[in-house]
Image (cartoon, grey):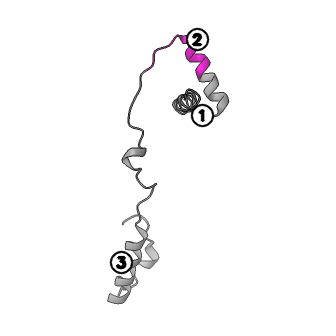
Amino acid sequence: MPPGWREEFLHLPLDNFRLQKYTVIMAKAKKKLGRHPKKPADRLSEIVTLRMTPADHERILQDAKAAGLSLSNYLQRCWRQAKKGGQ
């Protein structure tokens, strides 16, 4: 028996009208979940590798945590702020 079926309703006959109505309702219920895809220009697809000392790495992790950001987001924000200040 498929999941979601209730045994007490299996004995009820489905006439053509109820079958069509059931099919339409089930078709409407199946929607794609999740967010809409991002535009190609907005996707973060490039990876940057950075080498640093263990002490610097620990310090930057602490700074990112204190800011409430992931390490990646923290570095992006720092870079953008440095770029604005350097102009």
Mark 1 and mark 3 lie on one chain; the one further toward the N terminus is 3
Check if mark 2's residue and mark 3's residue have beta carbons within 8 Å.
Answer: no
| Residue 36 sits in quarter | bottom left
- Report whether 66 appears left or right of 6: right
Q: What's the distance in space between the residues labelled 2 and 3, CA to CA?
A: 62 Å
The residue beneath circle 1 is 69
Closer to viewer: mark 2 or mark 3: 2
Q: Where is residue 79 in the image (x, y as percent from the top left)?
A: 53, 28
Mark 1 lies on a secondary structure that is loop
| Along the viewing direction, whichever of 18 and 37 lies nearer the viewer | 37
**Which disc number belongs to residue 46?**
none
* Position of the N terminus by quadrant: bottom left
Q: Where is residue 83 in the image (x, y as percent from the top left)?
A: 53, 29
Circle 3 Cα neighbour tier, 10 Å, few/some/many (<14 / 14–19 / ≥20): few
Q: What residue type is labelled 2?
A: Ala
Q: Which residue is drawn at 39% across and 50% down?
A: 39
- Report whether 61 appears left or right of 20: right
Q: Where is residue 9 in the image (x, y as percent from the top left)?
A: 44, 78
Closer to viewer: mark 1 or mark 3: 1
Q: Which residue is drawn at 65% across and 31% down?
A: 67
Q: What residue type is labelled 1?
A: Leu
Mark 2 and mark 1 lie on one chain; the one further toward the N terminus is 2
The residue beneath circle 3 is 23
Mark 3 lies on a secondary structure that is helix
Mark 2 and mark 3 lie on one chain; the one further toward the N terminus is 3
Q: Which residue is drawn at 46% across and 54% down?
A: 35
Circle 1 Cα neighbour tier, 10 Å, few/some/many (<14 / 14–19 / ≥20): some
The residue beneath circle 2 is 55
Q: Which residue is drawn at 54% across and 29% down?
A: 87
Q: Range of the magenta residues? A: 50-60
